[in-house]
Image: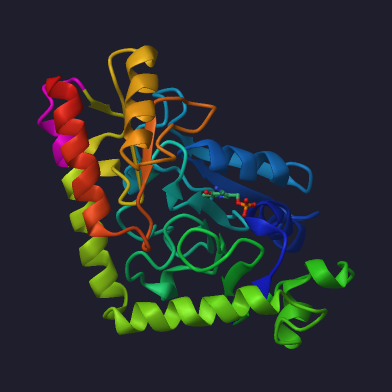
Amino acid sequence: RVLFLQGGATLQFSMVPMNFLAGIGSADYILTGAWGEKAAAEARSFGSVRIATSTAEAGYRTVPQIDDIDFDPSARYIHYTSNETIEGIEFSNDLDAHGLPVVCDASSNILSKPIDIKKYSLIYAGAQKNIGPSGVTVVIISDEMLARVPDGLPSLLDYRKIAENGSLLNTPNTWGIYIIDLVCKWLADAGGLEAIQARNIMKARILYDAIDRSDGFYSGHADRNARSLMNVTFRLPTPDLERQFCTEAASAGMVGLAGHRSVGGIRASIYNAFPLEGAECLAAFMDEFSSR
Ligand code: PMP
């Protein structure tokens, strides 16, 4: 079932444990960045949260190998963030949790590539990166998960009631949902998810290549196997140079390149709507800036 909700991905940090954890058992969280941390922190208000694995100590540069994750076989669900937007860390495959229900925060890479939907019990995403305007949250949930929702939750926080009412339990964000329809048609016309994935790979490669040929002037944050196709994060030798880079890039028409305030550095966010020419333009600027 596909549900259209409000409250952003942040409300899902609470709604997931409220529906599937409160009062019973424990849930496993995989931490590969700041958003996963926030999701786990919210879940602790509702029940027992176990960190199955975290790459925090190594500075959130990588994704864990599936065989290294020690899942609790009785976990109510496994939660992970398929793309960590701030650090630029992405899982390249669907997580295989050995039959345990997988809950995925896909806010920043949903619809960027095909996925095997059968591997997920619940996917949630704030719409504002790849799907549509802010103010709509998309939830994709299996019937099996819906059947587990306990009685007695406030209606607007109860996945089952929302599903039974076709996301019309109260007035939805009609304009936002209309725009999502247009974006989906745009995606289909552009060749669908395979085509958008091919374009996203090209865009990201253009920028990572610019990092890799800079002789260390630019240093990528993510390990190679965890490089995000959506958020390309890197540093320059000094914070002063990073500021100069952002200022000069802005003068050349490339804005919004400063990394998230919590980590600094540079972040080029290249979501579905971002054109290939934009990546080429930034890579040319990176070459020119580093040689100068
Ligand atoms: N999760 C991820 C991966 C995100 O990128 C964001 C927003 N940048 C959020 C959660 C929070 O989303 P919202 O602002 O829709 O609550």
Tell me, yes or no, whether the highlighted magenta stretch contains residue 105. no
Q: Position of residue 65 (x, y in %)?
A: 32, 43
Q: Position of residue 118 (x, y in %)?
A: 43, 75
Q: Is residue 69 left or right of residue 73?
A: left
The answer to whether residue 278 is above or below residue 197 is above
If the image is split into quadrants, where does the C terminus sit?
top left
Name the one closer to the observer, 54 or 278: 278
Q: Quadrant of residue 140?
A: bottom right
- Magenta part of the chain: 209-217
Q: Is residue 254 left or right of residue 126?
A: left
Tell me if residue 76 can be seen: yes
Name the one closer to the observer, 278 or 88: 278
> Which residue reaches farthest front?
251
Name the one closer to the observer, 279 or 97: 279
For image coordinates 42% across by 58% down, the residue present is: 109
Q: Quadrant of residue 60?
A: top left
Q: Is residue 136 left or right of residue 161?
A: left
If the image is split into quadrants, where does the N terminus sit?
bottom right
Q: Position of residue 275 (x, y in %)?
A: 29, 59
